[in-house]
Amino acid sequence: MTDIPPRPDHPPYYAAPTEPEIHIHLTPETAEESRWDFSWLQFGRNTRAIAVSVVAAPWWAAALRSVHEEQDLAGAWFMAFAAMGVAIVFDHARQRFVTRVFVWTAALGALEALPVFRALVHLMTGSAS
């Protein structure tokens, strides 16, 4: 038997361990958010919408008053809540200034035309007087 040594340029039979790759991820520290964040109220947007709807709300209130006089108070409440619901759905879907004006117009018009306090007392106590 002849012993033949391997060629000098022949790779060994096992794979040499490779150097591990090191990845460093730096995350900057962010300041802790304040618990008193009222940005969800959107003061500027709502203030401008209220300023515009103050002009249109009396017309809506007049329409609700005429429904109250010609039909019934329940009909006027239904009309007010239906308009408020549609305005809120549109505002939630579109989130535009005009839709926010519609929401505030529906709310202010109902407050101007309908007996809100008396209706709340009647709702909570059941007393019609």
Image (tube, rainbow, N blue to C red):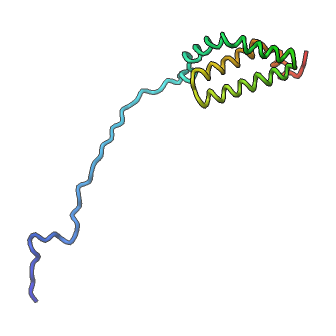
Q: Where is residue 124 in the image (x, y as percent from the top left)?
A: 83, 22
Q: Quadrant of residue 110?
A: top right
1 left or right of 30? left
Q: Residue at (87%, 16%) from the top-left corner?
A: 70
Residue 26 position by quadrant: top left
Which x, y percent locates residue 126? 88, 22
The residue closer to the viewer here, 121 or 81, is 81
* Picture quarter with the C terminus: top right
- Horizontal side of 44 relative to 53 (left or right) equals left
Above or below 43: residue 4: below
| Occupied quadrant, residue 14 | bottom left
Q: Which of 17 and 59 is in front in this view?
A: 59
Which residue is found at the position 16% from the left and 69% from the top? 11
- The residue under the point 84% across, 16% down is 68
Please state the total of marks drawn on the protein image.
0
Q: Which residue of the protein is positioned furthest toward the bottom in this rendering? A: 1
